[in-house]
Amino acid sequence: MRFGLFIKVLLWFLLGLLAVAALLPVALRFRPDLGPGGSFFGGGRFLQAARLISDSLGRVPFERWDAVLERHSEVHKVDFVLLGPGGRRIAGRDVEVPRAVFEKIAPPVGPPPVFTLRTTDPVYHWAGVPLPPMPAAPGPPFPPVLLARSTSMTGHGLYWDPVPWAIGAAAVLLFSAIFWLPLVRSITGPIARVTRMTEEIARGRFDVRLGESRSDEIGRLCAAVNDMALRLDGYVKGQKRFLGDVSHELRSPISRIQVGLEVLREGTDEAGRVRVDDILEDVRQMSGLVDELLSVARAEADPGQVRISPVDLAAVVEKVAAREGAGAAGIKVNVKDGLVVSADPLLLSRALSNLLRNAIRYAADAGPIEVTGRREDAKAIIEVRDGGPGVPAGEIDRIFDPFYRPEGSRSRETGGSGLGLAIVKTCIEACGGTVAAKNLSPKGFAVTATLDVAEQTG
């Protein structure tokens, strides 16, 4: 049957009430007495102790009553005192009885009840029970009251025993857990799976799916998330395919424009050549932008063509540093010898080239650029750091987005199209790695790429 979550919870609650109603007659068969001498108050221990004391007092002369009560006081760890008419002490320990206790012992109507009482200043816990008349007591027979005083609320187990309460509470909690756990798990389990799926979607994985076949609100949520992931996957793939197609189609006319401008430059005077040179520079920048767009599109559109193989990291870094650092700022390389990573050599080389090119462009005058490589467990950590100004802290998470550049780097003089770090991210992720960036203190900027270490064979 198809029910919403509200109806399911309501029906489950009513089912719980029916279960409690079914168990109630069973509980009433035990008829627990909640009074001071009942089963929930020590299982009648106080009344049993009172009967035992009464029997002991009836078998000994009056002169030994103090000893009998003293012995029971030590056994039960409470102060026992026997009171006669008007609250007069007959035997037992000499304790000060508060007025509130006297009022319980001598009620306006009827005999003294079995009672428990708490008094303050100082704090004591009292219990009292009337005993049958004592023939051995001096004077005419009278019904005395046995009084017990303790600093413990439970009277050290004599007044009442917390064990039955603990067992009852544990039974209720266990029943509630067994009863409600299936419903709670049926709600929280799918929500946890939806959360994990949306986290994967946020990381750019649109091929994940939820296999929930429910018809309630959670089922509809899962279906909506699946549909969203499917549509996003189609949109992103379409965008990448469109970007690659456009970039590929632009390369030919741009190349022809470059050739035509070179021919035109040779046939013009000096003033015309200056203007043609400006146009050629714009075309070269346009050609570089198209090449970068095509690189991003190819790496993202067809990850199946990425050829992962063991790559000597030090050799690739040295080659790229020699090529990109020629005539520019010094590049220091510190890569552990023998460190082999799993990557596509061309994509890894392209990523490192863009990282070094980016560092040279923005921090060439701030000191040497360092490239380090080390192993941590089964991962290889590649870091490119410079001493430049870095980027605003709030923009760190956006610098790997295509065409994104900080506001201060949007002029033509600074160069770049905002695709360099996007290409780095695409290439590293295509090799199965991750990339991150951070500002250094007090100044500087670092980009860290993480790749798997290749398994050594042979």
Image (cartoon, rainbow, N blue to C red):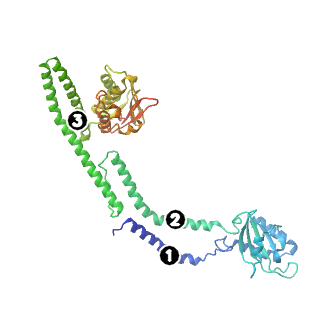
Instruction: Quadrant for residue 344, please give it.
Output: top left
Tag of residue 21:
1
Q: Which residue is most to the top? A: 270
In this rendering, position of residue 85 left or right of residue 266: right
Question: Which of marks 3 and 1 precedes in the sequence?
Answer: 1
Choose between 67 and 25: the one closer to the eye: 25
Q: Amino acid at mark 3?
A: Leu
The answer to whether the residues at label 3 and label 2 have Cβ atoms under 8 Å apart is no
Mark 2 — residue? 174
Q: Within 10 angstroms of label 3, few (less than 14), some, or many (20 or more) residues?
A: many
Looking at the image, the residue that sits furthest to the front is 271
Number of other residues with Cα within 10 Å of mark 2, as a class: few under 14, some 14 to 19, many 20 or more: few
Q: Which residue is mark 3?
A: 294
Q: Quadrant of the N terminus?
A: bottom left
Tag on residue 366?
A: none
* Side of 391 relative to 349 (left or right): right
Q: Mark 3 or mark 2: name the one nearer the start of the chain.
A: 2
Q: Position of residue 347 (x, y in %)?
A: 28, 33
Establish if 307 lies above or below 49. Answer: above
| x then y, percent, for residue 129 | 74, 75
Dot 1 alpha-carbon crowd within 10 angstroms: few under 14, some 14 to 19, many 20 or more: few
Q: Residue at x 36, y 54 (%)?
A: 194
